[in-house]
Image: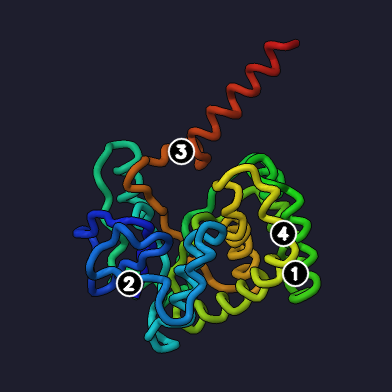
């Protein structure tokens, strides 16, 4: 089953319920009658303000009924995988894309270990890019925790931090066996990080979503260290089109271009 993480009721008629199931996280005062909820059974639902969709990931890991060979995935109520053609038509011709079908997922995973979003390309390193938006010292704390608990992943972590592209949104589709192995590794790190990061230092609720932000980088570390064969599909946003220039997010490209012009104007 591919779980669609949401924090509110939304129009889910476009979902093929054979393969997609809505799982609500966060407050439960606005939810569909057929939604699963992450505050039942073994859960960490109360951590959602800091963990984001990871409380859903935890719930799937602990409570999902799939067999180890079954397919399990995590997407969002407004972010889904689609094909490159569908994404191109949506980006440049405003044609609403179709969500990646269950049949396409199964076919792809016959040749790959995991489905992930097409990497976001950036001009700065992953570490620098993270520091532009968040507290960069948290990456150093994370590195210390990896060194302490899983030192065999340290080289992969350092390599990812110096890369110029990364996966985002904590979206994935794979076998339940791979999903569970990743979750066990991820939450061992998260548990230790909780004791080392002071949430009171963050100035707003957005920055307090720290564990979700860090997990986006950790997924790439884990995949690369494990040597998994990845099949990338575009991830589209139902509420905001992602326009790109030469594979780089257009909004980021325009900001960088304006910054360059501003610097030149000062000389």
Q: Quadrant of the C terminus?
A: top right
Rendered residue at 41%/53% (across/down): 235
Distance between the alpha carbons at the discs numbered 1 and 2: 33 Å
In percent of width and height, residue 70 lies at 38, 83
* Mark nearer the N terminus (1 vs 2): 2
Disc 4, SS: loop
Mark 3 crowdedness (10 Å alpha carbons): few <14, some 14-19, many ≥20: some
> Residue under circle 1?
146
| Residue annotated with mark 3 | 244
Quadrant of the rendered image containing residue 110: bottom left
The image position of residue 184, as x and y in percent, is 59, 79
Residue shown at the point (59%, 62%) measured from the top left: 215
Q: CA distance from mark 1 to mark 4?
A: 14 Å
* Marker disc for residue 36: 2
Q: Are marks 3 and 4 in contact (CB under 8 Å)?
A: no
Is residue 80 at least partly visible in the picture?
no
What whole-number distance in Å separates the C-alpha atoms at marks 2 and 3? 35 Å
Q: Earlier in the sequence, mark 3 or mark 1?
A: 1
Q: CA distance from mark 3 to mark 1?
A: 34 Å
Determine whether the residue tagged by mark 1 lies in a helix, strand or loop: helix
- Number of the front mark, 3 or 4: 4
Left or right of 217, for residue 195: right
Q: Which residue is mark 4?
A: 197
Mark 1, residues whose alpha carbon is within 10 Å: few (<14), some, or many (≥20)? some
Q: Earlier in the sequence, mark 2 or mark 4?
A: 2
């Amino acid at each position: 089953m591919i779980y669609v993480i949401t924090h509110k009721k939304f129009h889910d008629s476009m979902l093929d319920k054979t393969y997609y199931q809505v799982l609500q996280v966060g407050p439960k005062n606005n939810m569909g009658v057929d939604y699963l909820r992450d505050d039942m059974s073994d859960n960490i639902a109360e951590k959602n303000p800091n963990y984001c969709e990871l409380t859903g990931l935890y719930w799937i890991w602990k409570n999902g009924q799939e067999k180890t060979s079954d397919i399990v995935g995590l997407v969002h109520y407004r972010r889904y995988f689609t094909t490159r053609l569908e994404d191109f038509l949506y980006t440049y011709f405003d044609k609403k894309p179709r969500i990646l079908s269950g049949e396409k997922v199964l076919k792809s995973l016959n040749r790959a270990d995991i489905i992930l979003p097409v990497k976001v390309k950036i001009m700065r390193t992953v570490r620098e890019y993270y520091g532009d938006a968040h507290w960069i010292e948290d990456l150093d704390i994370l590195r210390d925790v990896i060194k302490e608990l899983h030192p065999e992943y340290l080289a992969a972590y350092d390599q990812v931090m110096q890369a110029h592209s990364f996966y985002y949104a904590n979206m994935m589709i794979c076998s339940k066996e791979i999903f569970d192995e990743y979750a066990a590794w991820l939450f061992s790190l998260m548990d230790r990080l909780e004791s080392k990061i002071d949430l009171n230092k963050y100035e707003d609720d957005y920055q307090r979503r720290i564990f979700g932000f860090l997990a986006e980088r950790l997924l790439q570390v884990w995949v690369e260290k494990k040597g998994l064969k990845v099949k990338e599909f575009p991830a589209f946003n139902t509420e905001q089109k992602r326009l790109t220039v030469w594979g780089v997010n257009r909004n980021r490209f325009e900001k960088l271009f304006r910054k360059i012009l501003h610097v030149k104007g000062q000389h």
